[in-house]
Amino acid sequence: MSFAKKVYEALPMPIKNLAISALGNMNKRKRYGKYYNEYLAFLRESQWWPYEKLVEYQKKRLKELLLEVYEYVPYYRRILEELGLRANDIQNCNDTLEILKKMPYLEKQTLRDSLPDLINTNPKRKTVGTIHTSGTTGTPLNIPSDIESVQFSFAIWRRFHDWMGLPEKFKQVRFSGRIIIDPKRGKPPFWVYNAPSKQLFMSTYHMNDTNLASYVEKLNEFQPDLIDGYPSAIFILSQFIVKNNSKLAFSPKAIATTAETLYVHQRETIQEAFKCKVYDQYASSEGAPFIAQCEYSNYHMNFDTG
């Protein structure tokens, strides 16, 4: 466990909220800026492009990416040179997808074993944080990320929020695997509040029949526009609401599930409990591909992201 996590766990509850809000303020400045605004404008336009235009855009962006990794990423320079390719070959290629087809898949174990060789050394892409994947298909990954990638990722999220009909600013509740409260804690609160983002983090480690009534009470007080997170956690809460005929003083605009498989029976129970639509999405941590449901419940692979 890191020193920062140890310090956080030792803090009293009111100070935990201040610490989370301070971190939330730092993250907000990192996530929303020049790149976010530029990419969001682009994503709101490109979602209406025909398939052929998206493919051409992919090829153009792939050429830019291949040229950059050839120059700045030792692992990929080695791969491309083993294929007999140099920068001029990439620049003059009319269909970069053909180059991609010849390249080996990047396995998770390779990513773990060769991470230093996979980090982009472009001075414009300094690491500003680490992305943590959920590990649904295996061991979680920790991936260094630059500011442009971070803001692009949150622009993609904002477009997904558009699909759910959410306003630019809204209140949200998050259920994830992060330990935000001591798992041994026996009484509320089982949540912390990120004030700058109007985001309530609710612990998934205290969700039992003894405690769930306090979750419902807090939700009624907070009245979020969006509830998002692990479907298993939201399903547990929804089962409790349905079983006990709990009265909700609000109905969120949407529920967003992520990181795990959303099963049909889970979706039905969640929608019954909260009286709103469930939007499923996957791969938001990795950023490519970003797969999400629209208002018509269709899954879309966002070709403009990967």
Image (tube, rainbow, N blue to C red):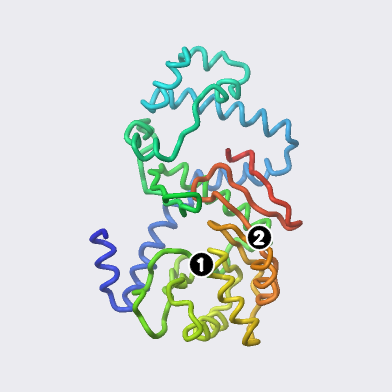
The C terminus is located in which quarter?
Answer: top right
Q: Nearer the viewer, residue 35 or 102?
A: 102
Which residue position holds label 2?
279
Give the image quarter of residue 194: bottom left
Count the numbered circles shown. 2
Q: How many other residues sit within 10 Å of disc 2, few (<14), some (14-19) or many (≥20)?
A: many
Position of residue 255 measured from the top left corner of the image (x, y, whole percent): 62, 66
Name the side, left or right, on which 142 lies relative to 175: left
Q: How many other residues sit within 10 Å of disc 1, few (<14), some (14-19) or many (≥20)?
A: many
The residue shown at (51%, 24%) is 103
Name the side, left or right, on which 230 lies relative to 178: right
- Nearer the N terminus, badge 1 or badge 2? 1
Q: Nearer the viewer, residue 55 or 291?
A: 291
The residue shown at (73%, 38%) is 49
SS state under label 2: strand
Position of residue 240 measured from the top left corner of the image (x, y, whole percent): 59, 81
The residue shown at (68%, 62%) is 165
Q: Is residue 35 above or below residue 261?
A: above
The N terminus is located in which quarter?
Answer: bottom left
Name the side, left or right, on which 232 lies relative to 106: right
Give the image quarter of residue 195: bottom left
The residue shown at (32%, 35%) is 116
Q: Nearer the viewer, residue 20 or 34?
A: 20
Position of residue 215 measured from the top left corner of the image (x, y, whole percent): 51, 81
Separation of disc 1 and disc 2 at Cα?
Answer: 14 Å
Which residue position holds label 1?
174
SS state under label 1: strand
Give the amino acid at mark 1.
Arg
Give the amino acid at mark 2.
Tyr
Position of residue 287 measured from the top left corner of the image (x, y, whole percent): 52, 45
